[in-house]
C-alpha cells in the first residue's frame, strides 16, 4: 500500500464513525447512510493526492457528503420506502431508544435538505457556525438563519405532535 493509500486508510479509520453517524442522521436510514459515506469516500479518494492542499480533509469530506446527499434528495430513486422495518428485541431501554430515534428521524425528514444538513452539522457533529459555513460553502449568517428556521420548524412540529397525542 502506497503512502497516499495508507494516509487515506488512516483518515477513514479515524473519521469513519463520525461520518457514518452524520450520514445516518442525514438520510434517516442505516443502509442509505452507509451508502452515502461510501459514495462520498470514493469521490474524496479520487482527489486524495491533493489532500494536503485542503484546510481540513474532514471538512472536505463532509462537504462532499452533504453535496452527495443533496443530489440524492433531488433524485426520486432514493425515495424508496421499505415495506417492513426490522423490529429489534424489546426491552424498556431499547424501546425508548427506538422510539426516540424514530421520532428524530421523522422530525429531520420534515426539513428541507439544507436545513437538515445545518442541523446535523451544528447540533449532532457539534461544528461551529464558521465550520458549518465552510462545509456548506456559504456565509456564516446563512447558517445562522437556516438553523433558526429549522429549529423553529422542529419546535412547531414537536408541539403539534404533543397536541395530537392529548
Image (cartoon, rainbow, N blue to C red):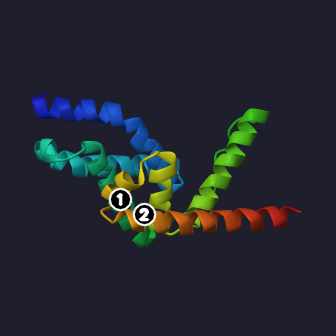
Q: Is residue 91 visible?
A: no
Alpha carbon distance from label 2 to label 1: 6 Å
Q: Residue at x 45, y 59 (%)?
A: 117
Q: Residue at x 75, y 64 (%)?
A: 159
Q: Where residue 91 sits in the image (x, y, percent)?
A: 77, 33
| SS at mark 2 in the image | helix
Question: Which class describes the residues within 10 Å of circle 1: few (<14), some (14-19), or many (20+)?
Answer: many
Out of 107 and 84, give the one closest to the viewer: 107
User: Label 1 near label 2: C-beta < 8 Å?
Assistant: yes
**Residue wearing tag 2:** 143
Out of 110 and 135, give the one closest to the viewer: 135
Q: Where residue 84 sits in the image (x, y, percent)?
A: 64, 54
Question: Which class describes the residues within 10 Å of circle 2: few (<14), some (14-19), or many (20+)?
Answer: many
- Indicate whether 28 appears above or below 91: below
**Residue wearing tag 1:** 133
Out of 95 and 76, give the one closest to the viewer: 95
Q: Residue at x 40, y 66 (%)?
A: 141
Query: Which part of the image, by quadrant, shows the C terminus?
Result: bottom right
Query: Which part of the image, by quadrant, shows the N terminus?
Result: top left
The single residue placed furthest to the front in the displayed view is 141
Q: Where residue 143 sits in the image (x, y, percent)?
A: 42, 63
Q: Residue at x 25, y 44 (%)?
A: 56
| SS at mark 1 in the image | helix
- Indicate whether 154 appears above or below 39: below
Amino acid at each position: 500500500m502506497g503512502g497516499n493509500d495508507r494516509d487515506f486508510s488512516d483518515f477513514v479509520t479515524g473519521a469513519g464513525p463520525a461520518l457514518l453517524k452524520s450520514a445516518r442522521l442525514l438520510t434517516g436510514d442505516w443502509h442509505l447512510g452507509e451508502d452515502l459515506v461510501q459514495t462520498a469516500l470514493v469521490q474524496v479518494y479520487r482527489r486524495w493526492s491533493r489532500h494536503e492542499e485542503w484546510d481540513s480533509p474532514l471538512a472536505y469530506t463532509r462537504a462532499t457528503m452533504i453535496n452527495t446527499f443533496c443530489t440524492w434528495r433531488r433524485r426520486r430513486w432514493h425515495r424508496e420506502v421499505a415495506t417492513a422495518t426490522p423490529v429489534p428485541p424489546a426491552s424498556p431501554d431499547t424501546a425508548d431508544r427506538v422510539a426516540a430515534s424514530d421520532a428524530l428521524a421523522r422530525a429531520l425528514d420534515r426539513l428541507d435538505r439544507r436545513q437538515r444538513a445545518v442541523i446535523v452539522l451544528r447540533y449532532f457533529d457539534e461544528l461551529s457556525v464558521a465550520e458549518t459555513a465552510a462545509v456548506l460553502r456559504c456565509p456564516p449568517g446563512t447558517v445562522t438563519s437556516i438553523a433558526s428556521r429549522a429549529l423553529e420548524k422542529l419546535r412547531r412540529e414537536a408541539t403539534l405532535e404533543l397536541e395530537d397525542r392529548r
